Amino acid sequence: MQHKEEILNQLHAMCAKDEQATRCHHNYFTQEVNEDCRRKMVEWSFTVVDSFNLSRESVWRAMDILDRFLSSGKGSSVKARENKQSFQLASTVCLYMAVKVHEDVEMTIGFLVKLCRSYYTASEFISMEHDILFALRWSICQTTPLDFARQCLLLQLDCFDPETIDCILE
Amino acid sequence: MPKADRWSSDEEEIVLLSLLPKPISHLDEGTYGVVWKARDNATQEIVAIKQIKFDSDMTKEGFPISALREIGVLLSLSHESIVSVREMVVGSTPDKVFMVMDCFEMDLQAAMKKGPGASTPFAQSEVKYMMRQILSAMAHVTSIARKYEHPARNMTQMVVTLWYRAPELLFSESCYGPEIDTWSIGCIFGELLIKEAILKGTGELDQIQKIFKLLGTPTDDEYWEQLWSKQGSTFKWKNNDSDLARTFAVNSFSATGQSYLSPDGFDLLSRLLSLNPKKRITAEDALRHSYFSCGVTEQVPMFYV
């Protein structure tokens, strides 16, 4: 059981870290790549994590990486905002990266290629990953809104226990 | 030695100066390759840069997963007692990636061997100071890094240097939780008291024997009985009683080569070195232990000033 003071300290640490993080642009959409494209990729990502029993949180982490990448204006992010195929590639790689960092199971590049029915090649995936890492300067473990929500719920431990909180967040 | 090589990080330039005599952290030794001392030409500051080691994985599976996780975690930490990763810089080819970190003169092991009072034990106030730093850093890591906990793919056993490895890891338990870190901190506590590693095993089996010799064999312990029966262990361990109290003299000014240890300090030591990981004290609870609230006040160790 954690103490309130510690949870608050963690919240402070998370806020401080968030201040330093690469900002998300409030609206990076273009005519070609719009809200609808992002929504579709979120839905697709949920289908993937659900069918492989991965945590749904990985999707939020992936989207966090994607949003920051597309807001960065660096490297191929410019292209990914203008071109649907490139956007789709970037979002797939973001999911791959989130799984890589946070999940116990490995999602291999070969698997990604199959998942996309060879629409993209292994080297395209790898070079996109490289691009994202460079654009975000490797800061791919940022605090997500879900982390903040969890901390806030933890503060209400009198009302919820950690397991209930996990259920609420799911 | 690529002495004159420059590594760019946008506008700034990092110039490699020399190879640091020792990797900054011993846990990293061998895992990620060499650490260099370097100068940041933009700020003229001396920094440490660590080259990320790539193997053939790079081309097959993208950026190495272990390095990605380490960088991710380090970038998300912010604590006065934790070395901070300032930024990542890259060289001319994609396999040249460096972490730029604060540069420190020495690591703890070097500090024990050098410094003005190298031949005498630390004052208990100094030990307490360092223990608080270590524990509060660990508490921070535990709270922030909770989301990165994985029963990592059979890598866990290699994660911790043998001498600091928790007993359950030596029995191939594959759970990686904060308990294995508090065990290591217990080992460091003992080491700070006598300025020598307390469990210097020559191999995994010898390490286990040394642990049981110092702390006694876990008889009548639910956790160990379960673990051994789960593994169908045929080993019979010689029944030892704990040697901890004899190894670390409490309230003794005459114990040679050892820092003074209060009963509170001994209690904390034995809780950190609990053989049962479920009963091992957490870093957060350790900070609330009477060892820190009672007795002598903490003092910055001599090698700092």
Image (spheres, helix red, strand yellow):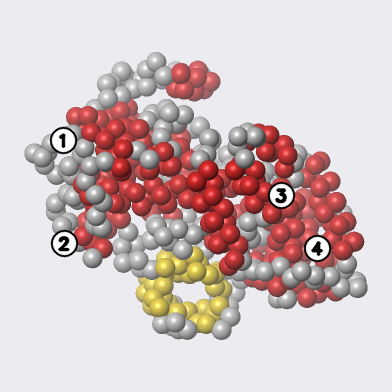
Mark closest to the chain's N terminus, 1 or 2: 2
Q: Are marks 3 and 4 on the same chain?
A: yes
Q: Which residue is mark 1?
A: B251
Badge 4, how many Cα within 10 Å: few under 14, some, many 20+?
some
Disc 4: which chain? A
Tell me if label 3 and label 2 are in contact, CB under 8 Å.
Answer: no
Residue B84 visible, this orientation: yes
**Measured from the top left, where is residue A37 in percent x and y?**
88, 62
SS assignment at label 2? loop
Name the residue type under label 2: Pro
Return the mark for residue B116.
2
Q: Quadrant of residue A85?
A: bottom right
**Measured from the top left, where is residue B170 in percent x and y?**
43, 34
Q: Nearer the viewer, mark 1 or mark 3?
A: 1
**Measured from the top left, where is residue B77 in percent x and y?**
51, 57
Q: Are marks 2 and 4 on the same chain?
A: no
**Measured from the top left, where is residue A25 in percent x and y?**
74, 70
Q: Which residue is mark 4?
A: A89
Q: Is residue A160 left or right of residue B66?
A: right
Quote the CA–CA distance across marks 4 and 1. Answer: 65 Å
SS assignment at label 1? loop
Q: Nearer the viewer, mark 4 or mark 1?
A: 1
Disc 3: which chain? A
Quote the CA–CA distance across marks 1 and 2. Answer: 25 Å
